[in-house]
Image (cartoon, grey):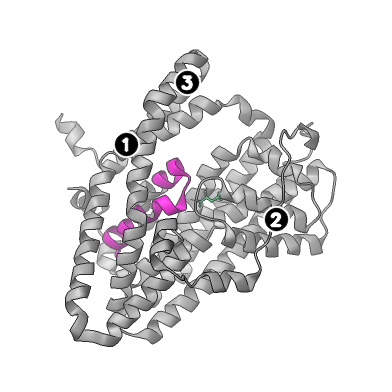
Amino acid sequence: MNKNKKMSLATKILLALAIGIAFGLIANGFFSATINEGLNKWVLSPLGDIFLRAIKMLVVPLVLCSLITGVASIGDIKKLGRVGIRTIIYYTLTTAFAITLALGVANIIKPGMGTGLTLSQAKNTVEAAKAPFIMDVFVNMVPTNPIEAMVKGDMLQIIVFALIFGICITLIGEKVKPLLDIIIQVNEVLLKMIGVIMLVAPIGVFALISKVIMLQGTAVLLPLLNYLLTVALGLVLQGVVVYGLALRFLGRLNPIKFYKKFWPVMLVAFSTSSSNATIPVNLETCEEKLGAPKSISSFTIPLGATINMDGTAVMQGVAAIFIAQLVGVDLTMNQMLMVILTATLASIGTAGVPGAGVVMLSMVLQQVGLPLEGVALVLSVDRIVDMLRTTVNITGDAVATMIMSNLEKELNLSVYNGNSKELNNEVVA
Ligand code: ASP
């Protein structure tokens, strides 16, 4: 009992993940289909969905309140512009870098060579996602009705509304201070709600992960194991090596301290496969445990969850090469550049929800003339790949937050470098 009390929440989530995987494997291997169906319908799906819905419930109000308070606390519109532009440039460059890295890894490992797979094994037919007209993207960022934007959970529109709202609070000043105080307090309550909901995260994570493994099993992974492992290698390189170096050399921060405090957020992303659903815990961890100022994290995290998808970009790069190798096409240098360009755009356009990235892959394939059946083929392992790439997607947002905060000299270094365990308990308590 005592021992249990001392176990941090993060450790409990990790344990739940391990037990969930083990349970899923046992159920898949030994239980009958009827039992698994019942387990899924009556226990795992409801439990997993309750957890998912509870954290998603906080996304819109939290992004709104935290961005308004964040912007209002900057007080300097020039600074807001500087952070905004730097962040967007950083997001785009790291994404292009991630795809280049993926192309390099896939060209060395050659996951599509000698697999014995053919594209006719793809079961579904696929229609290409259309690239949106770039001006439409900008126009649509401005909501005509902010309530509708919140109802739909349109993150870019919510960000634009909250930014202007926050700026205007600053412009008016003293007169609307009570309103700002209320929003700050609502934000506090929402942060507390995350802490409370996260208490049941071990149950939610267990249910989500065992459901995936139970229904999917490992047999489905085997034919595409080469592809899966190549993506995983690309993701590890991006998620640990590239981000570690970025933290060290761009942010002048100790990467180990970052990962020590950040890994519970990675577990939430892994088990939910959703950058959007991870926004609340990501915000809370960046601010409370890693010392980022709300004025920066409230902007970089939701924006990153919407447009910065380095993990998705890695998957798209590897998948393009994999599919090209399956059909025996050697991509020229020009085509590779085209993959970098379109996959950067495709990953920016990918929504932070499960399975979105693989749909956008069709855009990349079409651009370089590869068969769209390739999407259907990689789809069979995409649930697992999605969990991995989402983990990298949200890590990229947090790393950017740390770097931007430190560049602005606003990162609270004593919190960043402080003892993670104490802080963990503090937030949860
Ligand atoms: N699931 C990913 C995310 O939420 C998007 C994707 O499918 O690549 O970040």
> Is residue 248 visible in the rendered structure shown here?
no
Compare marks 3 and 2 and give the one earlier in the sequence. 3
Location of residue 73 in the rendering, given as x and y in whole percent from the top left corner: 27, 77
Q: Which residue is mark 1?
A: 202
Compare marks 2 and 1 and give the one earlier in the sequence. 1
- Is 392 in the magenta? no
Location of residue 365 in the rendering, given as x and y in whole percent from the top left corner: 74, 53
Q: Residue at x 31, y 66 (%)?
A: 66
In the displayed structure, 207 sits above or below 322; it is above
Residue 37 circle label = 3
**Kind of residue sitting beneath label 2:** Met
Q: Residue at x 84, y 51 (%)?
A: 330
Q: Is mark 3 within 8 Å of ligand 1?
A: no
The residue range painted magenta reads 267-291
Location of residue 313 in the rendering, given as x and y in whole percent from the top left corner: 61, 56
Q: Which residue is mark 2?
A: 363
